[in-house]
Amino acid sequence: MGYDMRRTHMCGDLREGHAGEEVALCGWVNTRRDHGGVIFLDLRDRSGLVQLVCNPELSPRAHALAHQARAEYVMACRGEVRLRPPEAVNPALATGKVEVMVRELELLNPAQTPPFEIQEGVTPDESLRLRYRYLDLRRSVMQETLLLRAAVTRTVRSYLDENGFIELETPMLTKSTPEGARDFVVPSRLQPGRFYALPQSPQLFKQLLMVAGFDRYYQVVKCFRDEDLRADRQPEFTQIDMEMSFVDADEVMTTVEGMFSRVFREVRGFEMKTPLPRLTWRRSMELYGDDRPDLRFGMTISELTELFASSESRLFREALGRGESVRGFRLDGVTSPSRKILDELVEFARGLGSAGLIWVVREGDDLRSPLSRHLSEEEKTGIVEGLGLGEGEAGLLLLGTFEETSERLSRLRRHCVERFGMEPRTPWSMVWIVDFPLFEWDEEEGRYKSNHHPFTSPKTEHLDYLEKEPLRVLSDSYDLVINGSEVGGGSIRIHRRDLQERVFRLLGLGEEEAWEKFGFLLEALEYGAPPHGGVAFGLDRLVMLLAGRDNIRDVIAFPKTQSGTDLLTGAPDVLYPQQLGELRLKTI
Ligand code: ASP
């Protein structure tokens, strides 16, 4: 050793302007090409790669070392930057116009042959990638994604700092904070038989920080939810968590829009138009069938129930008699679809549990449809007008309850976007969904459940019928949806004890149980809790969208598999009997 490794430049930063300069570089061997005589090494670091030329005439020692070098060896070098001869320029490489004539080369650490090639365009098998994550993370696409992630948090922090938010930490070893998932728990050694819960979110602590007078809080924080994993879920994930005092929903949303505008400008160069559109939950269900609509595509749902009020057709008469509705949308992206395509869509709708999909195609003054014989002229015109069908355009209709048709039409709509490869109207669509119902009815458990969480405030004007008609009560809540994906949400909170207790009661929490679980909150609400509200965003999902990735594991340095395993360390692991003993635990 003893070699002076102090770098003068990063590999990927060298350009024509550096020609003639003496540089010192460090990094990993990306590739080695031996041209009999001269050896070329591509040296890679975080910034990219640059070509090193090891010529035996310039340095026999460097050349001999280069001869031994293999992929992923860690090397340092010194030499002069020179312009490549024109025929050797590589336009695909940022440093493609230059190369470094190596005078000194040093091997800092050799490497085993990696289990997969670390090369642009090569995507190894995922379990290998997770097992050797430190190698996977060397791949440029992974480096770019994690740098983008850092750019997002940096931008968020600077925006929030400038806007009077204070970054405060909240505990990881705590008591259950319900966000609708199972808790991860940690046994206490000092109090055997007792357990901490890892936070599903810092919800209650951030509210307490408002009671404490901090006014504006934020944190980029890990949250833990023990639920079944999907492509966009991880058991531990990161939230951008915020809370503000003396605000209404509008002020929270405006503050967030400022933050997102900055993130999209800085990270994607996209100018977001603010204020963002706001759709009530009800309207979103009516127009898109779900509460996370992708507004990059059309195909909004129309309700045609009225049109069939006195229909001759038994199908419609019976459905309407059962209180069902007739809803559908115009299929975009294909004109005069073939019978095969339409049959395929009928099959898809059947797969969703619907008895059948009614399709219609406008052909001149008539409608082509399996039902056309049963439709009156008035109904045909009504369908054409209601769905806005142009010549050759198709409409898709479903019968069923509002909930059934919502769910099925929303899935059918998403399916059509993919099936017909529809081009988005804009690269990004952002929309707030507001005014969610405070509760939903849980059939299985036979009780009301919070739509967001139990600390969400009902709309003041709905307080009168909170107990009488709980399902009619709307909350002061908002979700942000980007390109059809919910990236976050929040609400104005309950800041009075009496109201919080009413909501707990409706959720079936007895007085004793409410006190046992949330006594500390109820008490705090009585010591001058200010009106407050906040919001939280899933950082991983946001980065996934911004980076154009479709797997959440690709935006997390050390993620877990679908079964919650960390393939690198082998967690979760068993405990030694001694550890179990200390914790007074027995495994069965
Ligand atoms: N704590 C909520 C969540 O994690 C967000 C919020 O209401 O601020 O979804």
Image: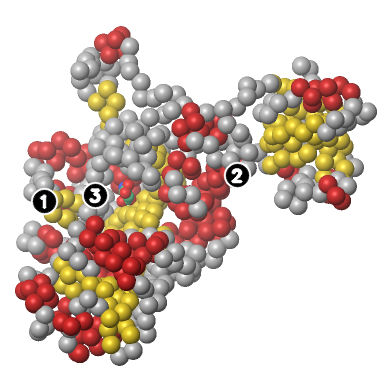
469 is higher (above) or lower (below) than 564: below
What's the residue at 68%, 29% (across, down)?
A: 71
Q: Is mark 3 within 8 Å of ligand 1?
A: yes
Q: Residues within 10 Å of mark 2 (few under 14, many from 20)?
A: few
Instruction: Please count the marks in the image.
Output: 3
Residue 380, label in figure: none
Disc 1 secondary structure class: loop
Give the residue at the far top of this rendering.
578
Q: Position of residue 86 (x, y in %)?
A: 87, 51
Q: Which residue is mark 3?
A: 453
Q: Name the residue: 33% across, 77% down.
A: 394
Q: Which residue is mark 2?
A: 121
Amino acid at circle 2: Gly
Amino acid at pointer 3: His
**Is any atom of residue 181 visible in this view?**
yes
SS category of the residue bearing label 2: loop
512, 65: nearer the viewer:
65
Which residue matches tag 1? 443
